[in-house]
Image (tube, rainbow, N blue to C red):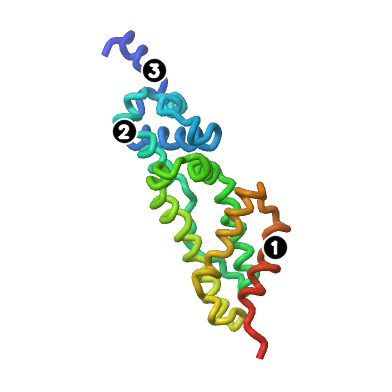
Amino acid sequence: MGTSSWTAASAQPASLRRRGAVLERAILEAALEQLSTVGWNGLTMEGVAAGAQTGKAAVYRRWPSKEDLVADALQAGLPRLDEAPDHGNVREDLLALCRLAREAMYSRPGFALRSVIHECDNLQAERFHGVIYDGVVEPTLKLLREVINRGIERGEVRPAAANGYVFDAIPAMMMYRAKMCGSEWIEQDIEEMIDQLMLPLLRPEQG
């Protein structure tokens, strides 16, 4: 290659020479950024392409629709909830788990997810049901089950509390108050929910 050709190639922005997984990751990151700033209704494939510093064709080649792109972006970006806290008592474990959930809710993928939940119509929302359930709901419920069952083994929790209604209480409350009341779940709110709602629900009956 001549000197002038080499100079022209090397002068190209690195973003334009990205390929494969590196480019796909940049596009998914740009989609999350768009969702967390302009929301579902404001997100466009053109805007994602501009954010990823690539061409619109590169986006459409991998994801034929906005729904496909957003589903993959959420799957790739949502934080992993893999391990239940174990601080030796159910109150501290629930507090730690709620703090993890709060961090996830207010992360960039969390804002992106909420824009999808709040702005999509019913048909569009169906497309994301599996992503939301598999990526958020089931992992959270799994950790809650572990914490509560561990509390039962220690004698802190009544055995009958290991049921779906109790497991649903924290996620339902956090989502409801975040959406309807604008709650940002400061430390005091988390402690009050655990002390005033969950511990009375879980406490063994006095014989």
Q: N-terminal of the two: label 3 or label 2? A: 3
Please tell me which residue lies in front, 45 or 91: 45
Q: CA distance from mark 2 to mark 1?
A: 45 Å
Direction from residue 43 to residue 91 in the image, left or right: right
Q: Secondary structure at mark 3?
A: loop
Q: What's the residue at 39%, 52% (across, down)?
A: 130
Q: N-terminal of the two: label 3 or label 1? A: 3
| Of marks 3 and 2, the one in the foreground | 2
Q: Secondary structure at mark 2?
A: loop
Answer with the quarter of the image where residue 100 lies. bottom right
Q: CA distance from mark 3 to mark 1?
A: 54 Å
Q: CA distance from mark 3 to mark 2?
A: 27 Å
> How many C-alpha atoms fall within 10 Å of the one at disc 2: few (<14), some, or many (≥20)?
few
Please tell me which residue lies in front, 58 or 134: 134
| Mark 3 lies on residue | 12
Direction from residue 136 to residue 206 in the image, left or right: right
Q: Which mark is residue 64?
A: 2
The kind of residue on which mark 2 rests is: Pro
Where does residue 13 sit, x and y in percent of width and height?
41, 20
Q: Secondary structure at mark 1?
A: helix
| Mark 1 lies on residue | 191
Q: What's the residue at 37%, 32% (across, down)?
A: 23
Please tell me which residue lies in front, 143 or 207: 207
Where does residue 24 sit, x and y in percent of width and height?
36, 35
Taking the view exactly as shown, the residue that stands out farthest to the left is: 1
Disc 3 + disc 2, Cβ < 8 Å: no
